[in-house]
Image: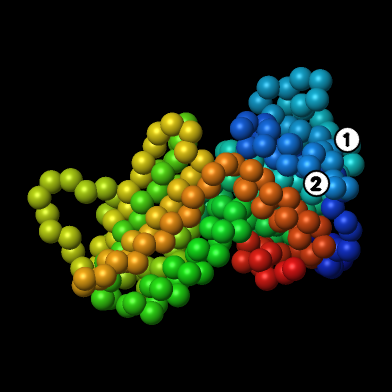
Amino acid sequence: MMTKDKQNTAPRTAALQKILIIGYGKMGHVLEDAIADTPDTTVAAIVGKTPDADVYAELSAIDTPFDCLVDFSHHSNINKVLRYAQEKNKPLVMAVTGFNETQRQQIADAATCIPIVFAQNMSAGVNILKGVIAHLSRALGDGFDIELIEKHHNQKEDSPSGTAKMLLAAIHQIEDKTLVYGREGYKKRAKNEIGVHSVRGGTIAGEHTILFAGHDEIIEIKHTALSKRIFADGAIRAARFAVTHGAGLYGMDDILKTK
């Protein structure tokens, strides 16, 4: 991974005007439409698998000025994306899931050179939900059983979802819990288990439900994405944040703290 001089880590003051879109699948198209609806912001260029007159096949072919990269492609592109962002010394918004621990470290290393906003879910609502879950799991302690159910469209590859993993990580003392993926057979639920259940079907944009089941009472919290537009809007908000900050690894929590 490349390194940058200290001078490149200073806070930035640029306004977001041009966004480079990486990945032109469903989310890339939604992001393009969302940018078109955003005042004073345009698409600088698009990189996708099916290049045409308006879509580039490779990042290296782009010579158009831009302010920030937004990556909605695939985790296998991480090396090319991080290298290009560092070469251009531009902020990066990573809205991709499925990274392993080695790839996460690559992202952290690159963030010592450029601003990177990395989130497994760009929705403001989901990230607020994460804070609520952290509070509830801490306050309720071991007196409540926890179950997570997540639903997505039938084209989603990873299970459980990146958002589900993010929500699980927010649970108090998660390291002391045993995650059980689905249930089958004849076995009583253990006290320290958390059930994780994935549903795939139709065109479900995303739904995550957390159950806290106690003695004679249940707390159920659910977030439903009615369209993919919320993720695109969150990515634009993240890009606007990134262009005004210095090198570092940021999450949606940092963005939600700003006005």
| Residue of label 2 | 38
Image point 39% across, 37% down: which residue?
200
Q: Nearer the viewer, mark 1 or mark 2?
A: 2
> How many badges with numbers are in the image?
2
Residue situated furthest left in the rendering = 186
Which mark identifies residue 3? none
- The image quadrant where one finds the C terminus is bottom right
Question: Where residue 134 appears, x then y in whole percent?
Answer: 45, 71
Relative to 78, is 217 above or below? below
Q: Distance between the residues labelled 1 and 2?
A: 23 Å
Q: SS class of the residue under badge 2?
A: loop
| 157 to the left or right of 184 | right
Residue situated furthest front in the rendering = 216
Q: Quadrant of residue 29?
A: top right
> Callout 1: few (<14), some (14-19), or many (20+) C-alpha neighbours within 10 Å?
few
Image point 79% across, 64% down: which residue?
245
Image point 83% across, 67% down: which residue?
11
**Kind of residue indicated by mark 1:** Asp
| Residue of label 1 | 63
**Kind of residue indicated by mark 2:** Thr
Q: SS class of the residue under badge 1?
A: loop
Residue situated furthest top in the rendering = 52
Question: Where residue 13 appears, x then y in whole percent?
Answer: 88, 63
Front residue of 193 and 230:
230
Q: Which colour scheme is used?
A: rainbow
| 167 to the left or right of 6 | left
Image point 50% across, 63% down: which residue?
129
* Lower position in the chain sequence, tag 1 or tag 2: 2
